[in-house]
Every structure is written in C-alpha cells, then in structure tokens.
Amino acid sequence: MALPPYTTLGEKIWYYLFRAICGLIFLFLIMPILVVLPLSFNVEPYFTFTEGMLRFDSEAYSMRWYKDILTNGMAAPDAPMDWAWFADSWKNGQWIRAIKNSFIIGIASTLIATSLGTLAAIGLSRSEMPYKRFIMAVLISPMIVPLVITAAGMFYAFAQIQLNQTYIGVILAHVVLGTPFVIITVTATLVGFDKSLIRASNSLGAGAGTTFFKIQMPLILPGVISGALFAFITSFDEVVAIIFLASPEQRTIPRQMWSGIREQISPTILAVATLLVLLSIILLTVIELLRRRSERLRGITRT
Amino acid sequence: MPNFVEPITAADGMPLKKKLARALFRSKLRAAGLVLPLFAFILCTFVVPIFALMVQGVHNDTFYTYMPRTAAVLEDWDGSSLPSELVFATLAKELAKGKKERTVGKVATRVNRQYSGARSTFTKTARKAVKMEAPFKDAILKADKKWKRVEFWQAIKLTSETWTPAFYGAALDYELSLNEGFERKAEKERIHVKLFWRTLVISAVVMGFCLLLGYPVAYLLATLPLKTSNLLMILVLLPFWTSLLVRTTAWIAILQSQGVVNDILVWIGVTSDDSRFSLIYNMTGTVVAMTHILLPFMVLPLYSVMKTIPPSYVRAARSLGATPTLAFLKIYLPQTVPGIGAGGLLVFILAIGYYITPALVGGQSGVLISNMIAFHMKSSLNWSLAAALGGILLAGVLLLYWAYDRVVGIDNVKLG
C-alpha cells in the first residue's frame, strides 16, 4: 500500500503517525512476553532488570530459575545430578508435580471434550436438528458465564456427591469449559463440508460408521484437532475451577503460579511462564498449519 | 373430472407424504441423538449445579434443619413481645441437642448473619442449656441478656424461614427486618452496590480502551497485504494464546514500583526515584492488565468485519469530494459497526465476570464483584449471599449474552 503521488503533506504525516500508533499498540500487546523472557534468566531473585542485565553482563544471567523448576520441593536438591536425583525430582518436585497434573487433567478432559463436542457439532450442523439455536446457546454458555459462578456452582454441587478435591471433579469441570471451543471450531469446519459426499458414500453401500470414519472424519479432522488444542490450552490455562475444586494433590501449573504470585514471588514463575510461552507458540503454529490444511482439503483457496 | 386425487404412494404402498415425514422424523432423531450426550453432560455438570447454587440465594434451611421444632413453634409467635414458655422450652431442648451433636455452631453462624453478636449468645446459652430446668424462660433469659430483646427474636424468626429474599436484599445493600421489611443499610455498610457499579465502570472502561487500541490495529491488519498482515497477526494471536497468569505476572513485573515502566520514567526524568508511580495493586493495574488480556477479543471480530469492506467505497467518497475525516465517519465507520458491536459486547461480557486478574493485581481498589463472590464462597462461607450476588451477575451476563446472540449470532463466533 504505497502512497499515491497526489497525497497532501497532512495525509502523509497522518499515514506515518498512524503506523507509529499501531506500532506502539503492537508493542503493548507483545511487551509482557518480551519482558518475561529475559527476566526469567535473572540471577537475582527479583522481578526487575538489574544493572548487569542492562549491560549484557553474562554473569547477571543464569539458568538457576529453570533449575529451580526441577529442584523445588526435592528431598536432596544439592545431590549430584544422577538417576537418583532425577527420580527425586520426578517424585517430590512441586513444579514437576504441577506439570504432571496439568498434563493428566489436560489430556483427559481434552479427550472427553473433543469426542462429545465433535459429535454434538455434527448433530448441530444437520439442517434437520430441532431447536438448534437454543441448544447451541446452552452448549456455548460455559464460555460466557463468569468462571467464578461456574466454579462456585460446581463446588456447591460436587460437595454433595463427594467429587470435590478429586481428579474426576476437576476433569469434569475442564470438559465443560473446553467443549464450547470444540463446538465452535468443528462447526466452522463443517460449514464447508459437502453433504453430498455422505449421500454418495451411502449410495455406494457404506454404513453409517464407515461413512463417518472413512469420509467425514478425515475431512473435518483439522477442525477437530484444532478444537482439541483449544480445549487443551483452556484446561492447561484454567485456574478458577482448580482453586475451587482441587486439593493440593491436584495442583496444576496455573494453580502453582497463582500461589506463587500471591505468596512467595520468585522468578521461577517467570521461568515457567517462558516455557508456557514456548508451548503456546508451538500450539499456535500447529493450529495455523491445520487451518491451512483444512482449507486445502475443502478446496478453499485464499485470496 | 375425478373429485379426488389419488395420493402418490411409495414402492411399498404407503403414501409418500407419510413416508417422507417418517424419514424426516428419523433423521431429526439421529441429529438429536448426536447432540444428546453433550447436552445431557452440560445439563448435569453445568446447568444443574449453577441452578442449585442459585436456589441457595433464596433458600437457606440451616436453622430449619438443625432446630426444626423451634422453627415450628416460632411460626405462631406474634413477633411483638417476648415469646411464650413453650418456645423457650423447645429452644432449650434443641440447643442442648445441638450442643451434643455439635451443630449449634452452624445455627449460630446462620443467625449471626441476620443479627451480629448472636453467635456468642447461641454458643453460650447452648453450653448452659444442657443443665437447664423448667421454667426455661427464666433460665434462658438469665443465660444471656440478648434473649430479652424482641429484635433478637425477630431476627431468629427471620432466619427460621427457609425461603427468604433476605440474601438478595443483602446483595443490594438492603437489610430485612420482620416489622419494617427491607431498609437500606447504613451508608458505610453499602459495599455491594458500589462494587457492582465499579465492575460495570471498569468493564466499560476496559471495553473503551480495547476499542480505542483495537480499532487502528484491526484497520491496519485489514488493509495491509495478506503476507504482512499474517505476520503482524502473530503479535495479536501470541498474547491471546499465552496463559492468563503468565500475562498477569508479566504486568506485575512491568508496572510494579521497581518495574520496567517506573525505571524508564525515572531514567528519563519524569519522576524522581523516591516518588515512583503506583501503577499496580490498584484500579490502574486492573484496567491495564485486563485491557491487554481482552484486546484480542476486540481485534479479531473487528478484523473479520473490516476484511469484507471493499476499499473502493472510501475511494469513491474521496473522489466525490469528501475530506478523509468525513469519508471515514460517513462511509467506513458505519460499515464497521457490526464488528464494534460484536467485539465490544464480547469484551464487556468477559470483563464483568473477571476474577483472576483483579485478584492478583487489583489490590484494594481494583477488585470486582467476582472477587466478592469468591470471598463469600471460600472464606466467609456465606454461600447464600454468594449465590445472591452471583445470581445478579449471572442475570446481567445472560442478558448481554442474549443481546450478543441477537446482534452477532453465537454460531458466528470465531477463534483465531
């Protein structure tokens, strides 16, 4: 978008000024991530840039907070790093336990949310589906209802059936919070789905199961996977339901960060944050690749 | 001419119309069958729990559960003078029973919410009630002088009723009494309405900032060539995908008094080292962090609307003599209104329910209504009040959700 020759001086100034403003807004968006990365290598136990860091003094930087992720909570953190040390870290490390919990809860809730959500999205995208709008509104509502109310409601109801402070309770909560994302992404993929393919498959003698797994599933798979990733990141990032429903035994990474910020603020949180940013970059890339693949599969060319 | 038409039949002789209707019904069933598992799941783990909690907002049977007979005899009490010996006798028996079964504390806490100071009266009297003998009226009156007050008995009668509007009243800073009905609380005890207002104001401010910052960015992304805009889009999507706690932590590092912003301000001489700005643990911190977190929710809907606006419209307006400002206000802006509505509503809905960020960076002045709900749920254990506050918040959110569905349509929500 080059400037045409007839632009006046004022317009030129505005053009560059506008870009500068946009640059500042982009800086605002990305600044937290830019600040977290270097601070996580701080040798001091503070959240601030030290003089040495600003001079790029190599002694002002260290990996000690990354090591702390492994050692925090260990029985013998200063022992030589051998198998026993890693076993100790795997068993006792507070952050390690949080990471394990996050993956257990995240993967379990993603699997359930994705299968239930995909089925529902397929049903909802059929034109015969009765009360479509209302049902859709109900199924999406966990995304809209304030998390505190959702978590408090579950806390109250789960208390009656002894589900509080169990993995099952936490996983159920995360399934609820994850399904709207699956429904939204899968429904979006199904919009471009050619329904005559199903009829063609049926007329060639395939049963409902074969048609679903051999014809429909491969085509909507990119949408399903990105829905699953959304559900996973929702669970991975979720802390309100955990605060209400989980015991220390089910602490996840966000829960550990939450108490870290409130109680003993240490740059270990920043080191974990950096790792989480890396994870989100990876997931973002995967989703973008999937989206492109899905568009290619459905024959949509980008303009 | 035949006066009737032979109905068209299918191969098996059944009328085609009936057969089609049956096929349609079956495919309806099949579609519903696919949705049913999730719908039932959401109903059981989401809708019913929230509904059950909301019921708590108007229903509290603590007193009735643990002191059913006292509650029953109090029904006949006229409420104007001290109750009869029968009431005192029942009370003494049930207090003694509550003492033995360790339930008197629950009742005491419940009454204490209606009449502060009632807790100690109940526990003290219960301790003595074990050894009480008739006449119970004198024995109880001697145990604590609060029993002589008619207002105290009125408060007990109010708590003995299982269905009560008192908690919704309390959520709106009204006090319920037996004779006068609802009355506004004293000036300095009115905290909830203020908090609701603050939540609305902060959400509106955050929405305004998101629009202010999101509009130019979305415009730039929509007008740049696709290759560049895809690259810049990463800058919007990366924060969107980054953990909420990571971003909140980062804002603490940036805004705290020894943080990046203050360091820069000191360095360029805007402020001196010992008068650094307090940018976090107050309303400023909440607004800045929430704006950052919700900005992508504004940019993405705006972008998808702006993408569909042909650039030739503005060019046509310019060639017809409109100034850039006029062309923008009259031609471009009206076409982006759906995007503004979608993004604005979404940001507002998400903002009024925010809990984590205000709790971490809000300090005293930046907490929102969600934090109060969490406090009553987890710390003060006044679940009925939490339910009443939550009920009001939920009603507001559902109203906005309905509006969002009307304006945008939920099936048009897009992610990334």
Image (cartoon, rainbow, N blue to C red):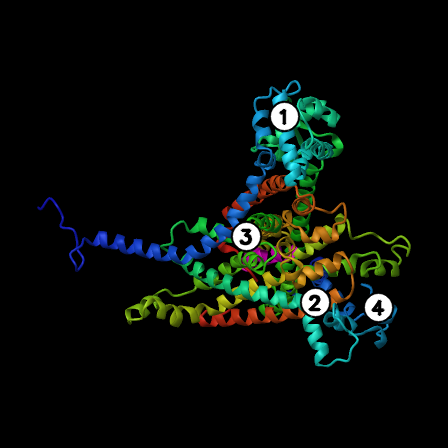
Give SS at disc 4: loop
Residue position marked by numbered label 1 in the rendering: B89
Is A28 positioned to the left or the right of B391 in the image? Answer: right
Q: Which residue is drawn at 68% across and 44% down?
A: B372
| Residue closest to the far top | B81
C-alpha gap between disc 4 and disc 2? 20 Å
Q: Which amino acid does label 1 sit on?
A: Ala
Residue position marked by numbered label 4 in the rendering: A44
Give a yes or no on whether discs 3 and 4 share a subunit: yes
The residue mark sitting in front, 4 or 2, is: 2
The residue mark sitting in front, 3 or 1, is: 1
Question: Which of A25/A110 is in front?
Answer: A110
Category of crowding for the residue at label 4, using alpha-carbon neighbours closer than 10 angstroms: few (below 14), some (14–19), many (at least 20): some
Q: Which amino acid does label 2 sit on?
A: Trp
Question: Which of A298/B318 is in front?
Answer: A298
Give a yes or no on whether discs 4 and 1 share a subunit: no
Residue position marked by numbered label 2 in the rendering: A95
Q: Main secondary structure of the magenta part?
A: helix
Question: Which percent across, then down, holds residue B214?
Answer: 65, 56
Q: Does the magenta-highlighted stretch encompass residue B243?
A: no
Is B164 positioned to the left or the right of B285 in the image? Answer: left
Q: Residue at x 85, y 76 (%)?
A: A59
Q: In the picture shown, does residue A178 fall above or below A154?
A: below
